[in-house]
Image: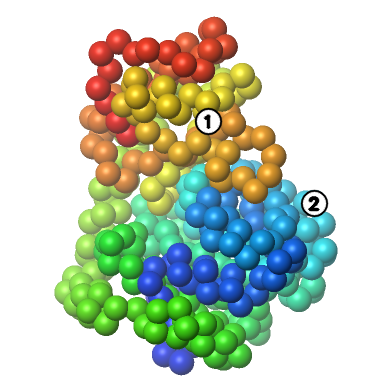
Amino acid sequence: MAARSIAVTADDIIVTSGAQQALDLVGKLLINPGDRVAVTAPTFFAALDTFNAYRPTFESIPFSSAGLDLERTVAVIRSKPRFVYVISDFQNPTGLSLSLDDREYLLTLCAENGVPILEDAAYDALRYSGEAVPAIAALAQRRGLGSLVIYVNTFSKTISPGLRVGWLAADPVAIKKLAALKLSTDVHTSVLNQMAALRVIDCGFAQHVRNICETYSVRCSAMLASLQAHMPSGVTWTRPQGGLFVWVDAGPGVDMSAAFSTAVEDYAVAYVPGQMSFASGDARQTCRLSFATASPERIEMGIRALGNLVAQIRESGNQSFAADGVESSI
């Protein structure tokens, strides 16, 4: 965290069983049934699922390549939701990051209205182009607003998802309450897993992160080039500078949720339907693609097949087609 200019001591941190548990602990602490929670649209679908266990009402703030919808941001934050949840770097599902201006603006607005910020930084280490932007937590500390931000991160994206070692950092009052909730949930995160993570950190972790960023950069470039080559006109997508995902908008008339079964069963292509990442509204023409585990060759095959499916849906309006000998996946 020091590398991100976030000043903390061990007493300010709780080690969690992945970032997902950190989100759950915050939900347990802050959400009562009927409370309003602000999220971006789209946002991480598993965060929505986690918070939904506590029966909130979601207030959505549109987020795109143009940044936050500032007019909607003002309206939502001034309504004083219980907190606002944001993924500041290389967001799941879009791959987009909040600009410095948006981070500063959101921080100022939340400070004026007493709204806590839950900053999910799970992907912040996976930058492979562009200049790093300070975390909201770091900006808050510079302005004497450190207690306003609960910061969440994890080793799942840099070491291993199965390790389930993450952490959260917050002010002492929140940490005391969150620690009690952690104790009642699972007592503590696996000590063996924590020691395994520490071993990796002590043995070339920085070089390991550089290596995986190089790998992801190649795969991201392959996906962007394949989208350019194989998607019909009118399809748009994000161009991330890090992370693991590209967000695709297939345009009006293409229901990526309805087409999912056909994509998997007939085209051997999997994606996350975009509708899952919205608390409300209609976004069925969107989907999330991941380049995390596929080789550039497999990515090209998968995008070509997906482009063919989108083109056929547009031509006929039918969301289901049989593929001809396609054996690819992304």
Indicate the position of residue 274 as horizontal and vertical percent values: 54, 38
Q: Callout 1: helix, strand or loop?
A: loop
Please report the residue visible at 67 percent of the width from the left and 35 percent of the height from the top. Answer: 282
Please report the residue visible at 30 percent of the width from the left and 40 percent of the height from the top. Answer: 219
Indicate the position of residue 257 as horizontal and vertical percent values: 53, 30
With 53 as the anchor, is 202 left or right in this view? left
Indicate the position of residue 295 as horizontal and vertical percent values: 23, 37
- Amino acid at the residue labelled 2: Glu
Q: Mark 1 points at which residue?
A: 257
Q: Name the residue under label 2.
A: 71
Residue at the far top in the pictured view: 316
Q: Callout 2: helix, strand or loop?
A: helix
With 277 as the anchor, is 280 left or right in this view? right
The relative height of residue 148 versus residue 27 in the rendered view (above or below) is: below
The relative height of residue 313 versus residue 137 in the rendered view (above or below) is: above
- Amino acid at the residue labelled 1: Ser
- Contact between marks 1 and 2 (CB within 8 A): the answer is no
With 220 as the anchor, is 285 left or right in this view? right
